[in-house]
Image (cartoon, rainbow, N blue to C red):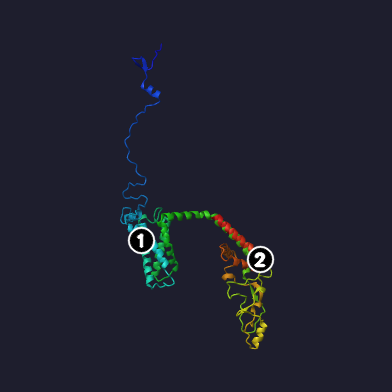
Amino acid sequence: MAECVLPATAWNPSTLAPVPSAPDLASESGVTEQQPQPQTPPSSPAQEPGASTDPDIPHPDLAPVVFFCLRQTTSPRNWCIKMVCNPYPLRIISSWCVSMLVILLNCVTLGMYQPCEDMDCLSDRCKILQVFDDFIFIFFAMEMVLKMVALGIFGRKCYLGDTWNRLDFFIVMAGMVEYSLDLQNINLSAIRTVRVLRPLKAINRVPSMRILVNLLLDTLPMLGNVLLLCFFVFFIFGIIGVQLWAGLLRNRCFLEENFTIQGDVNLPPYYQPEEDDEMPFICSLSGDNGIMGCHEIPPLKEQGHECCLSKDDFAYYNAAHQDFNVSGMCVNWNRYYNVCRTGNANPHKGAINFDNIGYAWIVIFQVITLEGWVEIMYYVMDAHSFYNFIYFILLIIVSILGGDLGS
């Protein structure tokens, strides 16, 4: 027979009741006893990711060696690193305030420069401005050299790795070229215009301004669709203008081919209202339906009076040696400009025309700026048709709608 094994239970002698064991008490109360965990010895504090264990490289983010020999702990590179990376030591040179004051001083000197009066720079005022300009150039050049020694020249985190540092480098190198040309008595005024870029160095000094400029530059690619729309508008309206009005703005009223004058009189080949080509009289050819014709030319006036004589009267008085230069006694030469044909000159020194797509784009750009577009519209209406105003009104409406979509 198998023996019956009872569970190990303690008995209370007073009550003869079994006393539950400790695990049973714990299970009844719903609390489990926690097993003590073995204590591990405290580990050494973890090193920061950016910390360097090499004493020769206290700044791991910078290049270990620059110019093939200058380490981070080598003089004078360690001084340059302190001035560039730490704004507190040597505050006189590396502080933000001093850099901004030099940039503001450069703006003042550029505004006070008068190229028409200071061609040879002989006045005291020009010499003082030149001294300030030399000081500003030396300051910017020293700042560039310090950054190159501290950061290095080429590399991701070196001096030329930053876009704004490249701008500073370009400005300083342009100043060096300018000074070298002055020493050789070579005047190159185009390089002097680089001085205008010096105030842009303030963007690299003010972090908030730099953020705004970067955001503005980042939004430029988003304007690609707007630029594409503008290109199509220019192209379509330009083609229409070339097809309709190529060469028409050169129409002028000329003299007759067999026109002869007896006497010493010099007449221009075509009618000009004010002896210039700024406000030309554009006529309509016989096959077009323009507003203006050569018969619309007003009579000639001298001393406020209209001339009424003809060329035959002029020949008669000239043969008789009589003076007819009195009120009303002058020849109306404008009546003989009665042949409308295409000439060689376009309005406004040849800038306003639709002879090719390039000039058409120039006209379209001027029209959408709403500057002088009415005058251009009148030129086209005079030469071609009254209903050409539809073209210009549609162009302005499309440009306004495109501008609203772009904004």
In this image, 148 relative to 345: left or right? left
Quadrant, the N terminus: top left
Closer to the eye: label 1 or 2: 2
Chain-order first, disc 1 or disc 2: 1
Q: Which amino acid does label 1 sit on?
A: Met
Residue 70 appears in the figure: no
Give residue 167's position: percent from left, percent from top. 42, 59
In this rendered view, identify the residue nearer to me: 135 or 278: 278
In this rendered view, identify the residue nearer to me: 351 or 144: 351
What is the C-alpha distance between the residues marked 1 and 2?
67 Å
Residue positioned most to the right: 287
User: Which residue carries the number 2 mark?
Assistant: 386
Residue positioned most to the top: 1
Q: Is mark 2 on a helix, strand or loop?
A: helix
- Taking the spot 43% from the left edge, 64% from the top edge, the residue there is 196
Give residue 255's position: percent from left, percent from top. 65, 77
Q: What residue type is labelled 2?
A: Phe
Vertical arrangement, residue 150 with respect to residue 376, above or below? above
Question: What numbered label is drawn on residue 261?
Answer: none
The local crowd at label 2, few if under 14, some if 14 to 19, many if 20 or more residues have their Cα within 10 Å, is some
Quadrant of the rendered image containing residue 352: bottom right
The local crowd at label 1, few if under 14, some if 14 to 19, many if 20 or more residues have their Cα within 10 Å, is some
In this image, 167 relative to 232: left or right? left
Give residue 225's position: percent from left, percent from top. 55, 54
User: Which residue carries the number 1 mark?
Assistant: 142
